[in-house]
Amino acid sequence: MKLHKNSKDLLSIYFTAGYPTLDSTLDIAEALEKSGVDFLEVGFPYSDPVADGPIIQESSQIALANGMTLSMLFEQLKALRSRVSIPVFLMGYFNPVLQFGVENFCRACKDVGVTGTIIPDLPMDEYETLYQEAFEKNGISNVFLVTPQTSEERIRKIDQLSSSFIYLLSSNATTGNQLDVQQEAEAYFQRIQSMNLTHPVIIGFGIHNKETFKKATTYAQGAIIGSAFVKQLTKNTDKKAITNFIQSIRQ
């Protein structure tokens, strides 16, 4: 379940575990795979999601109110690989991971078949000195984020530490802001593209429809849609609605 550098037009979907209902996580994951999504990002909710826009913040608050915790999520994910075969990444903040115990967290990810993690507030240096061994021992890929301000030296280091993909933020804004590929952003995407990195680059933040997905995948191997899909879940979670949403991006 590895993402390849020569892949094209990969579509990843983010959604919050335990939203809109406590037990909807695997149903949504299965429906997304059947709709043609290439890999998933399942968010574990946190009470202080500073990098998230209002849509994902609200989904986190509702998920927490529903009773979603990391322990509950891992319990639900015991059935993951009997229902979903595509790569699945857990995304969230470091505080719940630290409370759960980093070793325990990595082992639990391995036990349920999680591919990797995206923990935006885990500093790269801290990961490398304190936690890399626990992740690698359990075969869990940790995904690092690149912003327009990230230096080439740091990006090279991220590429070296990565084992799945590099998450390229379209801007420094919070999630949910629409992708606006102006001259400055284009130059940023082209700069990353010209670095010819070892691992696939996936663009996130602001991808919300077919047009923005196509723009993003001009410069990268794939793109991630989060807020727009979570917004869709507030309206309708049935399989047909999910399929229609994915088809609106793909077709």
Image (tube, rainbow, N blue to C red):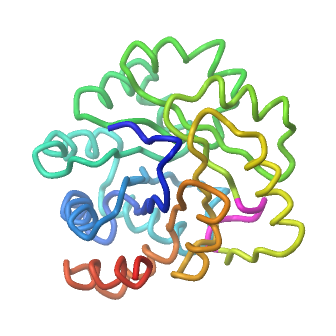
Q: Where is residue 211 in the image (x, y as percent from the top left)?
A: 58, 82
Which residue is located at x 22 percent, y 65 percent?
Answer: 24
Is residue 62 shown left or right of residue 159?
Answer: left
Question: Between 133 and 158, which is closer to the camera in this rendering?
Answer: 158
Q: Is residue 175 magenta?
A: yes
Residue 220 quadrant: bottom right
**Residue 222 vertical position relative to residue 232 in the rendered view, above or below:** above
**Residue 152 vertical position relative to residue 29 in the rendered view, above or below:** above
Q: In which quarter of the image is the C terminus?
A: bottom left
Which residue is located at x 75 percent, y 77 percent?
Answer: 180
Q: Does the magenta stretch include residue 243?
A: no
Q: Where is residue 56 in the image (x, y as percent from the top left)?
A: 52, 68
**Residue 72 vertical position relative to residue 8 in the rendered view, above or below:** above
Is residue 139 shown left or right of residue 182?
Answer: left
Which residue is located at x 52 percent, y 72 percent?
Answer: 227
Q: Which residue lies furthest to the bottom in this view?
A: 235
Question: Between 165 and 93, which is closer to the camera in this rendering?
Answer: 165
Question: Between 39 and 229, which is closer to the camera in this rendering?
Answer: 39
Question: Between 134 and 246, which is closer to the camera in this rendering?
Answer: 246
Is residue 167 shown left or right of residue 190?
Answer: left
Residue 245 quadrant: bottom left
Q: Give the range drawn in magenta.
A: 170-176
